[in-house]
Image: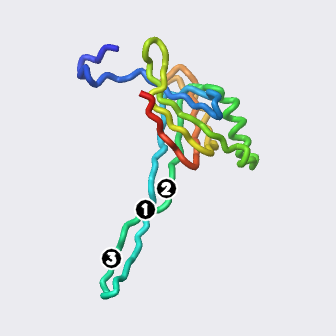
Amino acid sequence: MAAKKDQPANQQFLNTNYTLEIEGVQMGVFDRVSGGDLEVDVIQHQVVFENGGFASLQIPGPAKNQPVTLEGGYGKSAGLYQWFMQVCGGDIFAARKNATISLNTFVDGKYQPVIQWHMINVWPSKLTGFDFGQETTSRARFSITLVCESIEREDLF
């Protein structure tokens, strides 16, 4: 891939996409992923010493994940919609799945995963499915927001 005129050769953009697999079944290809922040709560622990002095200690609390939103063209949106409706119907225990989001780059004529994020006990909290404008793209847009209990990153390169 050639670099743009004003772009240094060592900073070339990759031709990438993201895939979502639920329980090993690919459910969609997306061009944008956001969220997924990992954070550890900070607990302030007040300590009083025998001599009357005191200190405020900062200690790590529970870890938490922010929701992940995938945006792009339609994939198996009917399957994702049914999964969402399972959550809406209150069947949350059956709706919890394991999922993998893969960052794929175009190498040797095909897309290959470079980084994967494995999400445990995932369920959809939001679907957006009515973005059909012609202003910026000629294809329909779809997004899904996922929440999970944990995220594990795997580098494949």
Residue that carries the numbered disc 2 in the rendered image: 63
Looking at the image, tell me whether mark 2 or mark 3 is earlier in sequence order.
3
Secondary structure under tag 1 reads: strand
Q: Residue at x 56, y 41 (%)?
A: 119
Asked whether 84 or 129 is in front, the reply is: 84
Q: Residues within 10 Å of mark 1 (few under 14, many from 20)?
A: few
* Mark 2 to mark 1 CA distance (whole Å): 8 Å
CB atoms at circles 2 and 3 under 8 Å apart?
no
Q: Secondary structure at mark 2?
A: strand
Q: How far apart are the two marked residues, 2 and 3, measured between alpha carbons? A: 24 Å
**Which label number is shown at residue 55?**
3
- Disc 2 crowd rating (10 Å Cα; few below 14, some 14-19, many 20+) is few
Q: Residue at x 72, y 48 (%)?
A: 93
Horizontal relation, residue 5 to residue 81: left or right = left
Residue 100 location in percent, x, y? Answer: 56, 35
Mark 1 = which residue? 60
Q: Amino acid at mark 3?
A: Ala
Q: Give the residue drawn at x 57%, y 41%.
A: 145
Q: What type is the residue that disc 1 sits on?
A: Pro
Mark found first going from the N terminus, 3 or 1: 3
Question: Of helix, strand and loop, which one carries label 3?
Answer: strand
Residue type indicated by callout 2: Ala
Q: Position of residue 31 (x, y in %)?
A: 49, 28
**Camera sees residue 31:** yes
Name of the residue lying farthest toward the front: 50
Q: Residues within 10 Å of mark 3 (few under 14, many from 20)?
A: few
Asked whether 19 or 141 is in front, the reply is: 19
How far apart in space, not on screen, are marks 3 and 1 (Cα)?
Answer: 16 Å
Picture coordinates of residue 101, whole percent (x, y): 53, 34
